Amino acid sequence: MDHANHIHLTRAELTPDMLNGATIYGPGDQKIGSVSHIHGLGSSSEVVIDVGGFLGIGAKPVAVPVGDLDFMRDEDGDIHAVTSWTKEQLKAMPEHRDPMAS
């Protein structure tokens, strides 16, 4: 996917409803996961990414700072993000556990 013509989104434009389910692309334009949900607001927020699995089953949730992702909108209006993280690096991170879900 050529991201050159995609519209980059500012942090102020990023809302949880807009980002839920967004595809995350790593180096080499490899699909590495999708946004599960967001924690926090503004520059200190974290994006929880489901990595691995198949059709959402068996995916591992990991949290990364929102600043590690470059969110954009493509020609069809779909939101996605690009990061320098690889799928292997994300899988090696500790699993995110939502303290509110216990």
Image (cartoon, helix red, strand yellow):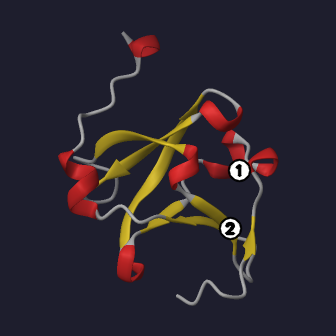
Identify the image quadrant of the C terminus.
Answer: top left
Residue type of the residue flagged with mark 1: Met
Kindly report the distance in space between the C-alpha atoms of the residues bearing marks 2 and 1: 11 Å
Q: In the figure, residue 66 lies in which quadrant?
A: top right
Q: Residue at x 70, y 78 (%)?
A: 74
In what element is the residue under mark 1? helix
Q: In the figure, residue 52 lies in which quadrant?
A: bottom left
**Residue 86 location in percent, x, y?**
30, 65
Comparing 5 with 50, the one in front is 5
Relative vertical location of residue 16 with respect to residue 75 in this rendering, above or below: above
Comparing 2 with 75, the one in front is 2
Earlier residue among tags 2 and 1? 1
Which mark is on residue 18?
1
**Residue 72 location in percent, x, y?**
68, 67
Which mark is on residue 64?
none
In what element is the residue under mark 2? strand
**Residue 63 location in percent, x, y?**
41, 38
Relative vertical location of residue 85 with respect to residue 16 in this rendering, above or below: below
Q: In the figure, residue 9 lies in which quadrant?
A: bottom right
Q: Residue at x 42, y 80 (%)?
A: 29
In this rendering, position of residue 101 left or right of residue 43: left
Quick check: marks 2 and 1 in contact, CB under 8 Å?
no
In this rendering, position of residue 20 left or right of residue 86: right
Comparing 26 with 58, the one in front is 26
**Residue 12 location in percent, x, y?**
81, 45
In this rendering, position of residue 73 left or right of residue 81: right
In this rendering, position of residue 42 left or right of residue 83: right
Q: Residue at x 51, y 53 (%)?
A: 68
Inspect this view and state whether residue 100 appears: yes
Which mark is on residue 72?
2
Inspect this view and state whether residue 52 appears: no
Q: Residue at x 57, y 49 (%)?
A: 67
